[in-house]
Amino acid sequence: MLSARGTATPPGARGCVESAATAAWARPATSDPQPPTKTSHPLRVAIIGGGPGGLYAAALLKRLAPDREITVWERNAPDDTFGFGVVLSDETLGGIEHADPVVYEALQAHFTRWDDIDIVHRNTRQTSGGHGFAALGRQRLLEILHTRCHDLGVDLRFRSEAPAPHHLSEAYDLVIAADGVHSTTREAYAHVFRPYVAEHHCRYIWLAADFAFESFRFEIAETEHGVMQLHGYPYTADASTVIVEMREEVWQAAGFAELDEPESVERCAKIFAEALGGRPLKSNKSAWTTFRTVVNERWSHGNVVLLGDAAHTAHFSIGSGTKLAVEDALALAACLEEQPSLERALAAYEEERKPVVASTQRAARASLEWFENLGLYLDQPPRQFAFNLLTRSRRVTHDNLRLRDAHFTEAVERDFGCPPGTPPMFTPFRLRGLTLRNRVVVSAMDMYSATDGVPGDFHLVHLGARALGGAGLVMTEMVCVSPEGRITPGCTGLYTGKQGEAWRRIVRFVHAQAPGAAIGVQLGHSGRKGSTKLMWEGIDEPLEDGNWPLVAPSPIPYKPYSQTPRELTRSQLTDIREQFTAAAWRAARAGFDLLELHCAHGYLLSGFLSPLTNRRTDAYGGSLEKRLRFPLEVFDAVRAVWPEERPMTVRISATDWAEGGTTAEDAVEIARAFAAHGADAVDVSTGQVVADEQPEYGRSYQTPYADRIRHATGLPVIAVGAISSWDDVNSLILAGRTDLCALARPHLYDPHWTLHAAAEQGYDGPGVVWPVPYRAGSRRPQTGRTDAPKPRLTLGR
């Protein structure tokens, strides 16, 4: 789970020392690497960096082709190492066993194994088992790889400065840059690799203890300066890795910036004296550092290729640094064997590894941010806190943890209030006078299928089918409050009596035919994003004819070719507020159970909230407090006519994914402001505010924003964004990261998603009810046999 990272100075630059001979490495290379050879079996290979990734690549390539000349440059001595223990997964070990049994057997002889994770918080220890770890000392790992390389005939050059990469590329067929997180090779060709390096908010130091923890241990210390955490695990029978981590401001307040290495080590030992049993900690050129996430747009240039931390990093809290480097080496060696040319081999290597690394980096980023925001979760019940920590990266889920340790997971469910046999997603949730029978929401999805704003048979079938499908709450698309507030000519509205009656027909169907399902209406105004084509005709493209004038907080077009909106005057603001009020009144008469005010995705009210779209200098622009003024005025006006017993929520974009836009901190304050005005929950989305946004997509990628708002404000939240499985829903709810989960595309794929989630989990309770005509389909249909009788005897000849 954890892998050691060097903390020497300079850390990561294993293959090169800055000197007169290598000063050019700090600048862009003066010449490009040699073009790839026509063969994928390079005979002369140079490897910069003698860490696990570089050494393993050398051993594999030499074993596959003994006639290869392979040279490894390592700036440090063979017995120098920084960091202490390394953890490798069963998956990685399986690849090593298949590729090089000699290395595998040597590793097996030195592994320390354990199954449990202990989480200690506020003098309470929670233990979860069934995790399965294998660790060994980093020095031992390097010794094994040194021996293997020597036995195979690899030329290992310790205490040696590698020649400049462009010189190596001229003299060798292939240059592998395994020179760490501070890779000078990467910097030399930065114009090609196009690296992105992000630093984060925590400081950490890599230490060790002269005893073995019984398990993987997370310990939380709440000090006068702030929260600190210990990550510890055994790597030999009598030694453990210990990483101490805390936010930068806590590190500064605790005075670590003024302490030297021995003083820092002693202070850490005192803070975590109970976990350490009063024993001291030791260092090995250890220094406080900030983790750097490295991403490269490209991994190869000519005959130079990046490997391991030079190409990518993943936070130590999910322990993938050494794992990824070793797997890179395996993949590179395999691609060199399989492909007909070096160019094809390097392309195949990048194509194979990039998605795997991206997935790992998303998990690592989620884990990293969880620890950065650890203070938010301190007041959670002990077992829920432990479950939250264990599932922080989204790699371990509710269902997966139940397989590993059913006893622990059942205890968390009991504490949460799940009746026996009830998954978390099927527990009820109350908002004001509305009790939802489960935690699943059909997210608002624009259908662009109305005529003159009137929802028709399509909307009846669309929303009715999803209500019959078992979700606790079904949301309409954004329903527009005026003809000019539509996004497209196909958008629905609630600005006429005819539209109100059409919606009443749909609401009546849901209440009559899907008892227990609630239906909510989302009210909004398109602002500067209106008067566009239907989505499938050209998303966000202006109509070719029939355009209507647009209004917005400021006269800024959404895209260069979009219509420029007019800046709203005070009188127009009053008119729009009254349009929202009238639409809300019609929604109440139609019988909707919940009303959501759309303040996200760059539409009108969202446009007021973001500093990128609100450049006003009057009382409605400037500070966040002023930018909130009009959306809050609309909220108050709508709340005044919306029935008191029915809940009202607000959808916001918690970040603009753009520099200078709304931040996560702003989102917390926006949520607080709406809560103070009576919002019952916040539906937390992100982005779509400016066209040049740079979202960080991935599974459940928006949920951390909901999580943060929930724990910072205490306000119930609805999480959205690439939540695709019932296991995700259970995990997010049980961890306390959200109260409700809204899913869009899964409900387009399967209108009965919630019913099927219940069937797949073997649940048949009040949290989801199969419509009587559908009861016969409540079990998965039988399929033909796909297995064959297994042979019982093996007869010799």
Image (cartoon, rainbow, N blue to C red):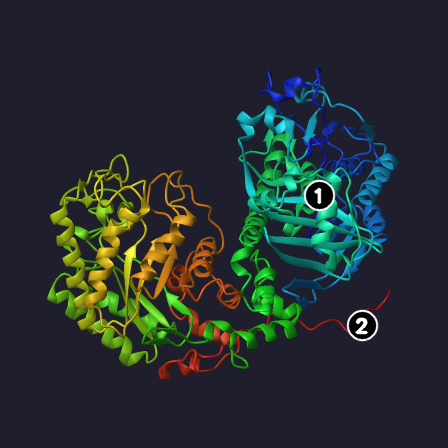
Is label 2 or label 1 in front?
A: 1
Secondary structure at numbered mark 1 = helix
> Residue 428: horizontal and vertical position, in percent?
42, 76
Marks 2/1 in contact by CB < 8 Å: the verdict is no
Residue type at numbered disc 2: Leu
Alpha-carbon span between mark 2 and mark 1: 66 Å
Secondary structure at numbered mark 2 = loop
Q: Nearer the viewer, residue 391 or 769?
A: 391
Residue type at numbered disc 1: Ser
Q: Residue furthest bottom?
A: 772
Would residue 661 appear left or right of 794 to someone viewing this image? left
Q: Which of 92 and 483 is in front in this view?
A: 483
Q: Nearer the viewer, residue 260 or 715?
A: 260
For mark 1, does the 10 Å Cα neighbourhood hold few (<14), some (14 to 19), or many (20 or more) residues? many
> Residue 261: horizontal and vertical position, in percent?
73, 39
Examine the rendered structure and indicate whether residue 488 appears above or below residue 611.
Answer: below
> Residue 676: horizontal and vertical position, in percent?
32, 61
Count the marks: how many? 2
Q: Is residue 454 visible?
A: no
Say which label, 2 or 1, has the lower sequence index. 1
Q: Could you say which disc has been placed on residue 82 in the image?
A: none
Q: Find residue 421 and report its image quarter.
A: bottom right
Question: In the image, what residue occupies the spot 77% across and 35% down?
Answer: 58
Q: Could you say which disc has been placed on residue 264 in the image?
A: 1
Question: In the image, what residue occupies the spot 57% across and 58% down?
Answer: 392
Q: In which quarter of the image is the C terminus?
A: bottom right
Question: In the image, what residue occupies the spot 64% across and 69% down?
Answer: 403
Would residue 795 appear left or right of 34 to someone viewing this image? right
Would residue 732 appear left or right of 157 to someone viewing this image? left
Q: Could you say which disc has been placed on residue 793 in the image?
A: 2
Q: Nearer the viewer, residue 532 or 767?
A: 767
> Residue 600: horizontal and vertical position, in percent?
32, 52
